[in-house]
Amino acid sequence: MKLTSIQKPFIVAVIAESTANKCLRQLMSAEQNGADAFEINIAQLKEKELRKILISTEKPCIASNRRSDFMKLYGYENLAETNEETRVEKLLQTLENGAEVLDFELDTFTSKHESLPFGSQAETRYALKSDSKPTQFSTHPGTALRQRRLVQLIKSRGGEVLISCHTQTRIRQNEILRIVQTIELQGADLAKVVTHTFNVDDLVNFLRTVVKVKNSARIPFNLMNFGVYSIPGRLLSAAFGSAWVYCRTGSQGFAGQPTVRQARTFLDELHSSQNH
């Protein structure tokens, strides 16, 4: 089943466990609680374990292979850093092992990464500065060309493409719109953008931005917030126009995400209220 064909908004359970058996337990539990699809983080997993996980469900699986500094958010402190070509190659192999969607970042193939340690105080300080530029966002023509070729390769092998951008900046409407447009130009099927919120005003601006993106985006998108009000923000984002919600499952889940059960209850109530 294609991820883009699921009724929206849908629930994606994020699996980031350290072994195949732990992943399978979380996947089964999330499916019972109402998950519609899964994101399997593969950076911490051995390649031989991936097929066992990816073929264990008939629901769509998104594979992502984040850099080692990002995976510290999930408690993995000592993952080896690999070059971009190796990282992308491991991601591509998941298509043969059962993944339906590949997720790569909007700065993939950039030789020098500008991002700060995710979830750190340095990231917070950076996000609070009004002149901070979004990280994970490359506009270099050569990088963009390589990304477009990667999109074409994934699609030629029958996969869908999700391009993500963890901006590490405070919510800015024009910036978010430009990032989504760039993702569309790369040929992606789905777009994901993460931005910071620090107070209620940021949350209001965030939700206004979701509506703006909904009115202009040509592909399904997920705009989510990191920081203050992240759980209500991510749920409300789906009510205002995001096509899905990312949810945590087990011990390696990210605390800023709602649980699958929370999201299922919220979306069921949303659906019910829209039908009355």
Image (cartoon, grey):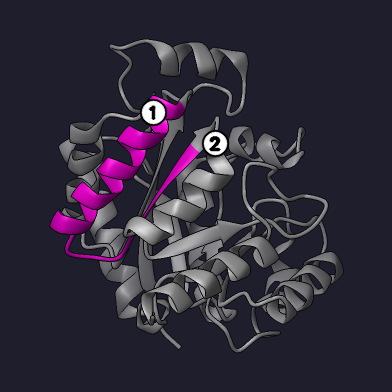
User: For this view, does 220 lie left or right of residue 127?
Assistant: left
- Crowding near pointer 1: few (<14 within 10 Å), some, many (20+)? some
Q: Are marks 2 and 1 in contact (CB under 8 Å)?
A: yes
Per the image, the residue denoted by label 2 is 229
Residue 168 visible here:
no
**Which residue is located at x 74 percent, y 71 percent?**
48
Q: Which residues are magenta?
A: 200-225
Task: Assign the magenta stretch its main secondary structure.
Answer: helix
Where residue 147 appears, as percent x and y from the top left, is 28, 52
Q: CA distance from mark 2 to mark 1?
A: 9 Å
Where residue 76 appears, as percent x and y from the top left, is 75, 39
**Which residue is located at x 71 percent, y 72 percent?**
30
The amino acid sitting under disc 1 is Asp
The amino acid sitting under disc 2 is Tyr
- Quarter of the rendering occupied by the C terminus: bottom left
Where residue 272 appears, as percent x and y from the top left, is 47, 78
Which label was assigned to residue 131? none
Per the image, the residue denoted by label 1 is 202
Q: Exactly how many numbered labels are in the figure?
A: 2
Picture quadrant where residue 56 is located: bottom right
Of callouts 2 and 1, the N-terminal one: 1
